[in-house]
């Protein structure tokens, strides 16, 4: 958790200066005078005994009283945890050129993406380096919902602003930043049951969403039950996915319903009431709130990157093992996205006659002793060959795990390396990620063929 909190240097800022495209931001929730922002669930966290810390310019819980980081981590793996991820930045891109703009700044295809379907992608510099990673969901034909990292807020906003200013179709793209809107994640094998109990039934008395047909990456709109059992005033955007490797959902209280936008400020009361209602109905044996510490250990076990540690402006998708975010139809004809001339040639490894990359992201099992944390050097036969970017004890495995970058050729599983930790060399064996098998809810093979 220490390594995670050290990355929390960037703060949110008050507003976005308009570029030539039409850019709107919801005002009134950004930090002023250097004070961290209180999320919609701040009072809830304090009342539950959350140890509040500043992360990405927001006050968020690191852990909760009477429940250690390891206990919270293990609970998520067997039951369900609720995370406040409102520090993440929510965006709406809409207009006839919205998909084209997103295809300019990312290597993914958006015009062919099905409605109410989302996926991970990367924002790119002309150098091929990663500006940030993001999850983008296509809501309608010309409307997209994107979530970017809170710690990159200022950089990402400046990036979108500058790219829109020079984009030929800028007058046909609307971009809004949904400041101050709650974003909540349910993560764990029991997440579908918890969410199912929280869905407010439709006029026919049935659940508004068939969760058995809502697969990983899918999204849907629904009203949720408030703590008094009544319906939320607007529909909530529900996306299946998350940052732990478990099945789960993210609930956006700021994306606006399919019938219209949510009321300003409504996110605060609605989010707290929905969360309290879920916890009340599920009970502490099925659902508990969790903090930043458990979120970090869970994502590392799942082999997921943390921007600012495992990804940065100098890292390309191929180096990070994220070449799959480059859609097949973007790999030919020049690609048409920023950095394509760098990124596409790197996708074919040197072993197959391509340009490849000189370093690759790997997982590591580190020997007994203190964990190899971010910055630890990796050595092979008396020579430095890489660096650890994330590392900690794994609550699930009971062993020290780490993620880092090593020279190409030393990235294969079972390669024996050494990590320099506190002046001592510890065994570091390259291993495949994820460290713990993921349990995303995906369609069965026969249905995949139909889709």
Image (cartoon, rainbow, N blue to C red):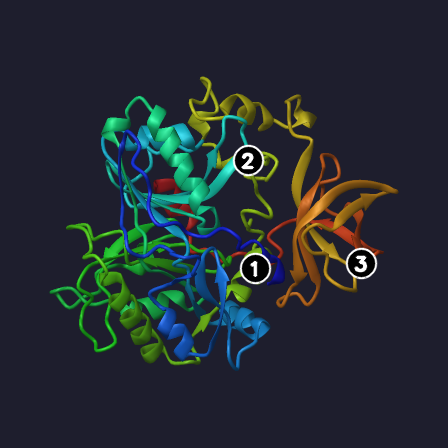
Q: Is residue 261 above or below residue 294?
A: above
Q: Is residue 278 above or below residue 164?
A: below
> Quick one: label 3, few (<14), some, or many (20+) residues within 10 Å?
few
Q: Is residue 449 left or right of residue 293?
A: left
What x and y, as percent, mark residue 422? 80, 58
Q: Quadrant of residue 80?
A: bottom left
Q: Is residue 450 above or below residue 42?
A: above
Tag count: 3
Q: Which residue is mark 2?
A: 317
> Quick one: label 1, few (<14), some, or many (20+) residues within 10 Å?
some
Q: Is residue 111 visible?
A: no
Q: Which residue is mark 3?
A: 422
Nearest to N terminus: mark 3 or mark 1: 1
Q: Is residue 190 visible?
A: yes
What residue sits 64% from the left and 22% below the top? 354
What x and y, as percent, mark residue 297? 58, 62
Q: Quadrant of the N terminus?
A: bottom right
Q: State the residue lying farthest toward the right.
A: 382
Nearest to N terminus: mark 3 or mark 2: 2
Q: CA distance from mark 3 to mark 1?
A: 20 Å
> Is there CB contact under 8 Å for labels 2 and 1?
no
> Is there CB contact under 8 Å for labels 3 and 2?
no
Secondary structure under tag 2 reads: loop
What x and y, as percent, mark residue 432? 65, 49
Q: State the residue lying farthest toward the front.
A: 33
Q: Quadrant of the C terminus?
A: top left
| Nearer mark to the viewer, of 3 and 2 | 3
Q: CA distance from mark 2 to mark 1?
A: 25 Å
What residue sits 21% from the left and 58% below the top? 235
Secondary structure under tag 1 reads: helix
Q: Which residue is mark 1?
A: 5
Which label was assigned to residue 282? none
């Amino acid at each position: 958790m220490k390594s995670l909190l050290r990355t929390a240097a960037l703060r949110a800022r008050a507003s976005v200066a308009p570029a030539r495209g039409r850019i709107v931001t919801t005002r009134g929730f950004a930090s002023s005078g250097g004070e961290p922002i209180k999320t919609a669930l701040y009072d809830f966290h304090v009342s539950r005994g959350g140890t509040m810390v500043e992360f990405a310019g927001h006050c968020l819980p690191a852990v909760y009283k009477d429940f250690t980081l390891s206990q919270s981590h293990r609970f998520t793996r067997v039951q369900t945890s609720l995370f406040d991820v409102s520090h993440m930045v929510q965006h709406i891109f809409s207009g006839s050129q919205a998909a084209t703009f997103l295809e300019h700044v990312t290597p993914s295809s958006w015009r062919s993406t099905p409605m109410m379907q989302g996926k991970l992608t990367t924002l790119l510099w002309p150098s091929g380096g990663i500006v940030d990673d993001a999850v983008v969901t296509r809501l309608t034909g010309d409307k997209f919902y994107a979530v970017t990292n809170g710690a990159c807020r200022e950089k990402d906003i400046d990036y979108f602003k500058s790219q829109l200013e020079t984009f030929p179709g800028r007058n046909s793209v609307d971009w809004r930043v949904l400041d101050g809107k709650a974003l909540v994640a349910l993560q764990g094998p029991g997440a579908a049951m918890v969410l199912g109990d929280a869905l407010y039934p439709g006029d026919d008395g049935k659940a508004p969403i068939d969760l058995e047909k809502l697969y990983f990456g899918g999204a849907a709109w629904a009203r949720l039950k408030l703590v008094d059992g009544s319906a939320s005033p607007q529909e909530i955007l529900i996306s299946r996915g998350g940052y732990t490797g478990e099945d789960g959902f993210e609930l956006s209280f700021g994306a606006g319903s399919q019938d219209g936008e949510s009321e300003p400020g409504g996110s605060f009361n609605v989010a707290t009431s929905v969360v309290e209602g879920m916890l009340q109905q599920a009970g502490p044996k099925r659902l508990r709130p969790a903090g930043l510490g458990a979120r970090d250990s869970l994502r590392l076990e799942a082999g997921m990157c943390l921007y600012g540690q495992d990804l940065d402006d100098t890292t390309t998708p191929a180096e990070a093992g994220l070449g799959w975010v480059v859609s097949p139809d973007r790999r030919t004809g020049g690609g048409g996205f920023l950095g394509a001339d760098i990124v596409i040639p790197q996708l074919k490894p040197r072993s197959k006659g391509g340009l490849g990359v000189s370093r690759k992201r790997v997982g590591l099992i580190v020997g007994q002793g203190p964990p190899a944390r971010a910055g630890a050097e990796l050595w092979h036969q008396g020579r430095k060959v890489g660096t650890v970017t994330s590392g900690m004890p794994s609550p699930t495995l009971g062993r020290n795990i780490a993620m880092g970058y090593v020279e190409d050729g030393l990235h294969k599983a079972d390669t024996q390396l050494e990590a320099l930790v506190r002046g001592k060399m510890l065994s570091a064996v390259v291993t495949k990620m994820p460290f713990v098998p993921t349990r995303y809810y995906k369609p069965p093979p026969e249905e995949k063929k139909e889709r």
